Image (cartoon, rainbow, N blue to C red):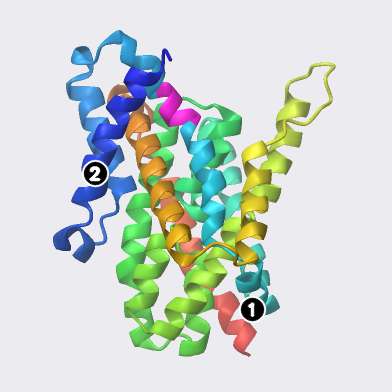
């Protein structure tokens, strides 16, 4: 019960962000509640931090770390195995190639060239290569990195994912790829699910449908990544324990995908679960924002932004070349 005050505090502001982003203006500029919540949280955490009671702190940390795991489990209600199989092997291999290459490039450049902290490199790379903020939060649930590093990684997703929403419809207009390939291109290279929907729907409903399926396949790949991360963390610990940390939330995520594939739940119930999941993610993002310290982020400099920018260019350019080779 010691966490209840902080959870209520985060939930109240998450509700404000959630309902604010339902207005026409926010939808027109594609501002979602997760982005808005972390902005509000960072503002309150840095400007009004001294007014937040000490008794709230544990609940805020609980919201930022623990509630997000439940949110990741419920994220499985957005995906079915049927959707994944329907997209075919072309979309699957596009996801595998883009995810693997982007992550490896990001981690290598971050640690070797920019000399950044390993946790920050992992978070930034996984955010660009898999599924944006959800991947960052899922990875942090195992890494337990400092909050300002998580916030910075999420911020790069917001920045370059927003650019992608406007860039990809322009690229489609230029005809760099046949329109039937553009859905795979968007789904395999754009950061967030919401950003994929925005970019795809600006081109055509068919492109949007394919893009979402390919993107959701990418989301599924977060699970094997987390298992590999668990192996790495286990070996890194240099202890006698060889047991790999089990990301129970990732396993339950797969279970929820399988259950969702059975199509047992009525659509109204499923929609309610998805909306509740969005709210939980919003609560987690607000808590994360409150725990973020601008002074620490300033100390990191411009290098993380440059790293995320290089990964974004790789996604756009190499993603187009790869999909064009599929056509050829």
Query: Seen in the image, is 248 located left or right of residue 151?
Result: right
- Spot occupied by residue 99 in the image (x, y as percentages of width and height): 60, 58
Q: Is residue 98 visible?
A: no
Q: Tell me: residue 328, above or below residue 297.
A: below
Q: Residue at x 33, y 52 (%)?
A: 159
> For residue 14, what is the image quadrant?
top left
Mark 2 vs 1: CB contact within 8 A: no
User: Vertically, is 177 above or below 68?
Assistant: below
Specify whether residue 62 is painted magenta: yes
Q: Where residue 11 sits in the image (x, y, percent)?
A: 31, 33
Q: Which residue is mark 2?
A: 17
Q: Is residue 111 left or right of residue 279?
A: right
Is disc 2 placed on a helix, strand or loop? helix
Q: Quadrant of the N terminus?
A: top left
The alpha-carbon separation of the residues under discs 2 and 1 comes to 35 Å
Magenta stretch in the rendered image? 61-66
Give the vertical position of 236 relative to 33 (above or below).
Answer: above
Above or below, 262 against 327 in this view is above
Residue with the mark numbered 1: 86
Point out the tag, 2 or 1, that comes first from the N-terminus: 2
Image x and y of residue 116, in percent: 51, 33
Q: Quadrant of residue 147?
A: top left
The furthest residue to the top? 54
């Amino acid at each position: 019960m010691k966490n209840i005050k902080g959870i209520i505090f985060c939930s109240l502001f998450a509700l404000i962000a959630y309902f604010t982003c339902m207005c026409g203006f926010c939808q027109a500029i594609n501002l979602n509640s997760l982005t808005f919540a972390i902005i509000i949280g960072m503002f309150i955490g840095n400007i009004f931090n001294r007014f937040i009671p000490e008794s709230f702190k544990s609940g805020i940390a609980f919201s930022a770390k623990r509630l997000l795991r439940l949110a990741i489990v419920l994220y499985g209600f957005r995906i079915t195995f049927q959707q994944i199989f329907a997209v075919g092997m072309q979309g699957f291999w596009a996801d595998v190639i883009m995810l693997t290459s982007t992550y490896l490039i990001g981690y290598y450049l971050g640690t070797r060239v920019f000399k950044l902290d390993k946790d920050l490199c992992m978070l930034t790379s996984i955010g660009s290569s898999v599924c944006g903020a959800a991947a960052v939060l899922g990875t942090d649930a195992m890494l337990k990195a400092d909050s300002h590093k998580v916030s910075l990684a999420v911020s790069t997703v917001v920045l370059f994912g927003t650019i992608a929403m406007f860039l990809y419809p322009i690229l489609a207009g230029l005809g760099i790829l046949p329109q039937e390939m553009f859905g795979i291109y968007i789904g395999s290279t754009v950061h967030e699910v919401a950003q994929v929907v925005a970019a795809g729907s600006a081109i055509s409903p068919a492109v949007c449908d394919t893009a979402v399926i390919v993107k959701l396949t990418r989301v599924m790949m977060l699970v094997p990544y987390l298992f590999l991360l668990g192996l790495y963390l286990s070996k890194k610990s240099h202890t006698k324990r060889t047991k790999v940390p089990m990301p129970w939330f990732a396993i339950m995520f797969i279970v929820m995908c399988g259950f969702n594939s059975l199509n047992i739940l009525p659509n109204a119930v499923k929609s309610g679960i998805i909306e509740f999941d969005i709210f939980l993610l919003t609560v987690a993002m607000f808590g994360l924002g409150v725990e973020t310290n601008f002074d620490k982020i300033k100390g990191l400099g411009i290098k993380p932004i440059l790293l995320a920018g290089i990964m974004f260019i790789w996604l756009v350019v190499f993603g187009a070349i790869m999909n064009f080779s599929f056509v050829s």
